[in-house]
Amino acid sequence: MSNIDVKNIEDRKDKLENSYVPIKISKILDEAKELDRVETYVINGVTNEVIKYNPVFDELKINEILKEIQEKIEYIEKNNINFPKDDDEFYKYVCFLMIKKFTHFSSEIADDLETQLAQMNALFRLGYFELIIGEIFNQDEIARVINKVENLLVLADRLESLKLDAQLEAQAVLQKMIGEQNPTKTKPESTNKMKK
């Protein structure tokens, strides 16, 4: 590389570094106001029925969804509940939790799983579920939540695998310790040889 090339690279690097603008807390506070914004979607102009929703999903509420998923998984395992039956049903439930956290339904949707499933199915059967998830919510926001849920599941699988590995290793160490404390006595070879 020639000296001219090196100088050009250094000049461009200096210009880039000098063009960076540190973000200001005032800008962050203005952006945070967007998280509280509520929009209204008219579902029936005759009866004036609407769905109120947050167009931008708040990270705190997304974390609440992740926490609720963890709690429900523990509850399902503890009580041997046959839910979800497949991935589609699981992701349908994740979308239901988005409806819970990012619409006006948040105050009406139950916390217990059994009631939630009944509410989810009613929303689905009447077409409101598809309307909210497919039309009202921003698909990028939905994808952001799904991505975080998938990351959570991957992490949970890794932790479960590490837990299993640690248990196996502990069992191996325990077996080795037991073996060292109680060495098996070797039987002396029999002096009686089989006669032909």
Image (spheres, helix red, strand yellow):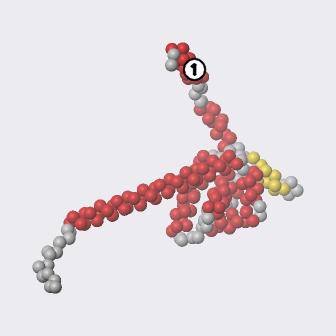
Quick one: SS at disc 1? helix
Q: Position of residue 13 (x, y in %)?
A: 55, 22
Question: Circle 1 sits on which residue?
Answer: 12
Quadrant assignment, res 182: bottom left
- The reply to whether residue 12 is visible in this rendering is yes
Question: In the rendered picture of this protein, how many numbered marks are placed on residues?
Answer: 1
Is residue 39 positioned above or below 93 on the image?
A: above
Q: Position of residue 10 (x, y in %)?
A: 53, 19
Q: Residue furthest front?
A: 196
Image point 61% across, 64% down: which residue? 86
- The reply to whether residue 14 is visible in this rendering is no
Front one among 11 and 69: 11
Q: Position of residue 177 (x, y in %)?
A: 25, 63
Front one among 46 and 196: 196
Q: Quadrant of the C terminus?
A: bottom left
Is residue 133 positioned above or below 81 on the image?
A: above
Q: Residues within 10 Å of mark 1 (few under 14, many from 20)?
A: few
Is residue 9 positioned above or below 52 on the image?
A: above
Image point 34% across, 59% down: which residue? 169
Image point 14% across, 75% down: which residue? 188
Image point 47% across, 55% down: which residue? 158
Q: Residue furthest top?
A: 4
Front one among 119 and 150: 150
Disc 1 residue type (three-letter): Arg
Q: Position of residue 154 (x, y in %)?
A: 52, 54
Q: Residue furthest right?
A: 46
Q: Residue furthest left?
A: 191
